[in-house]
Image (tube, grey):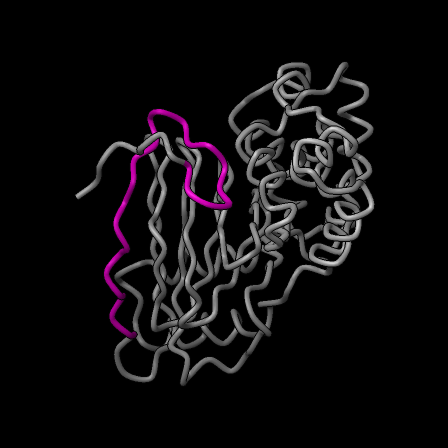
Amino acid sequence: MTEPARDDPGPGAWRREPSTVMRPPPPAPAEPAGPFVILAESEVAGTPLEWEPHAHPMHELAWVRGGTMTVRIGARIFTVPEGRGLWLPAGATHAGRLTARAELSDAFFAPDRTPVAFEGPTTIAMSPLLESLLLHLSRGDLDAAARSRAESVVFDVLEPAEQQFALRLPGDARVDPIAEALLDDPADGRGLDEWASALGISERTVTRAFRRSTGLSFAQWRRVLRVHLALKLLAEGGDVAAVSDRLGYAQPSTFIAAFRQVMGTTPGSFMGRASAPHNMSENPYPLS
């Protein structure tokens, strides 16, 4: 059973669109029968969806077409656009959001029979071959030999993206109000001095707290946060000017420059590359 989203976005999450549908934790998928390892499935979301925090007894690989997925895991937020997937180890508690009309695909891997391992949640390069194999495995009419062959090739081509793209939340009570305010409204343009004054702490304290907890300066952290949301807005069909305005940039050229600093390319080039199947294996992320 689903219910419309509440206005409260919850800790460390983007503010929900009013039409977002909340879903309870999904039931644990049954492990594949016999010697097989992988269960694959997919669905198309008609409205924005959000899943409450949950974990699976199997490893999960999730990816999308025609939109973006945002996943909160502990103190990190992963934004997963087309051409990338997210590997979630068995037992990893996570919550996720999916943009409207995006096609979500999942593959579950039996932990005791999976011959590959990743250290924690990992962004996966969804090459055309890997995606095709996993979609092939979602068919219900494969015989045992065909399934076994496909699974073997999956493990040959299942690889992490060269660099990961995740936003680490501070988790520091001194600056958490800044992070929560910017997650709620990335267009908030208050500078370091204004935030320090509002919180009654020094600018140096704010700077050190962000560096120590996230590895980024305040300005860098806000820039990366805005790019996370930009990926979602662009995938929903927003043009560069509208996205730039939504994120609080004075002009589109400033937004384009910020996007390039984080992603290594312009918004238009990135979205064109993400939607081109023959380019899905390229790595667009210059920031780890």
Please, is residue 46 above or below residue 103 in the view?
A: above
- Within the image, what quadrant is residue 118 found in? bottom right
Please, is residue 263 above or below residue 132 in the view?
A: above
Q: Quadrant of the C terminus?
A: bottom right
> Was residue 15 drawn as part of the magenta stretch in this picture?
yes
- Magenta stretch? 9-31
Q: Residue at x 66, y 37 (%)?
A: 199
Please, is residue 211 above or below residue 67 in the view?
A: below
- Would you say the magenta stretch is mainly helix, strand or loop? loop
Q: Quadrant of the N terminus?
A: top left
Left or right of 254? Residue 181 is left
Can you give x and y, in whole percent of width and height, for residue 129 in the image?
56, 58
> Was residue 258 drawn as part of the magenta stretch in this picture?
no
Q: Residue at x 64, y 24 (%)?
A: 187
Q: Nearer the viewer, residue 254 or 143?
A: 254
Can you give x and y, in whole percent of width and height, for residue 257 in the image?
82, 28
Left or right of 113? Residue 209 is right
Q: Residue at x 70, y 24 (%)?
A: 189
- Within the image, what quadrant is residue 253 found in? top right
Q: Residue furthest left?
A: 1
Left or right of 257? Residue 69 is left
Can you give x and y, in whole percent of width and height, for residue 252 in the image?
75, 17
- Within the image, what quadrant is residue 179 found in? top right
Left or right of 38? Residue 250 is right
Can you give x and y, in whole percent of width and height, for residue 24 in the image?
25, 50
